Amino acid sequence: MRVVIVTESFPPDVNGVAHCALQTARHLVDRGHAPLVVAPAPPKTPPGQGGAPVPGAVPDAAAPCPVVRVPSLPLPGYPQVRVALPSRRVAAALTGHRADVVHLAGPFVLGVRGMAAATRLGIPAVAVYQTDLAGYARTYVGAGEAAAWRRLRSVHAAADRTLAPSSAARRDLEAHGVPRVGLWRRGVDSVRFHPGHRDEALRRALAPNGELIVGYVGRLAPEKHVELLAGVCGLPGVRVVVVGDGPSRPALSEALPGALFLGRRTGDDLARLFASLDVFAHTGPFETFCQTVQEAMASGVPVVAPAAGGPLDLVDHGRTGLLVPPHDPAAVRDAVAALAADPALRTAFGTAARAAVEGRTWAAVGDELIAHYEDVLAARRTVVAA
């Protein structure tokens, strides 16, 4: 199967859309398929990686397949996010790769062009919903939620199938009139993220006085509401550790007294940090899935998360962690305090969390995605035959 993955983000970007697109490409290669990625160019793209036409597209250094880079600009006020500029490279990639199916990862800008090109060329498209853009509009501008949903609905309604990462996301899509919605959850590397990577030397460095370590991992941006951890910072015997970067970091340094900010971490370094936490606390209410919650669970760490979006599927309240009302700093503080006071409960939650996700590998969910592709292709063949 020849698949073109049109993604709004791809490594070296560090976010859920980029990570999922990379894992999808890897799995397709592993299963003998031929993927091609189309993505916005990162800053200062090296020569030869600026979007060469297919079939001469060259792979990025760490990519498992060729990558076509589309010129992009940084999003004003949030330079870590790149927005693709209009380009003929999208249609050229679909044609040159002789795509059987187009995979649209978090379509909003580049994905809209990918959907339009797929429609013109008569190529089936699977659109993967990954980002609550309506929630972001509400956070950043206090308006625009309806406009965001109109744009999302237009691209997803044109796709042969839309895949939601969680039950909550699926309900949102269907409530806003998106047809043909299926469920496709995310995988986790349960070898890399493993309780066995707990590092006592690292724990001593993070909490030299033996404090309970409560960690947040993710972007430091307004929609994540990391400031809700302020009450946790005030708990006796607790050290808050923040992993990640973004535009909110200066403000959070003021809002979270005593918190340790480690910046962005990846790979085995990130895995050691996850496994060395005592509690993982997520605060963002707009997560369509929330991969960091799943990585914490794979690491055997109990989770505190808002009872909204993706965490509703991931966290079994009272068994693998605690769900709290969104936007409620007192609830976050009290949930962490309850876990801090009960080591046996933390151990039980962490063990159950690991068991809940360890079979959800990228290989398993990747095969589910290929089955969605095959269903879409079969439906197209049926229509043509009729």
Image: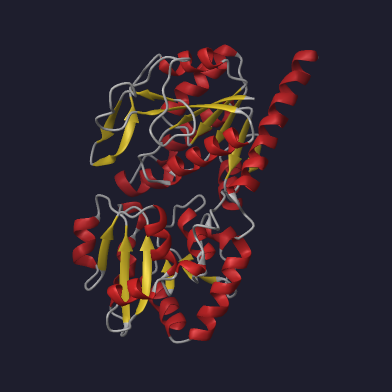
Query: Which quadrant is the N terminus positioned in?
Result: top right
Query: Which quadrant is the C terminus positioned in?
Result: top right
Quarter where residue 58 is shown: top left
Question: In percent of the image, x 45 and y 41: which residue is there?
Answer: 17
- Nearest the eye: 237 or 227: 237
Q: Is residue 380 left or right of residue 14?
A: right
Q: Is residue 233 left or right of residue 162?
A: left
Where is residue 234 drawn, in percent x and y?
A: 28, 79
Count of labels in the image: 0
Q: Is residue 189 left or right of residue 337?
A: right
- Compared with residue 116, is residue 309 higher up or lower down, i.e. above or below? below
Where is residue 179 drawn, in percent x and y?
A: 64, 34
The answer to whether one can see residue 324 in this image is no
- Compared with residue 78, is residue 88 higher up or lower down, i.e. above or below? above
- Nearest the eye: 205 or 379: 205
Q: Is residue 372 left or right of residue 82?
A: right
Where is residue 289 drawn, in percent x and y?
A: 52, 52
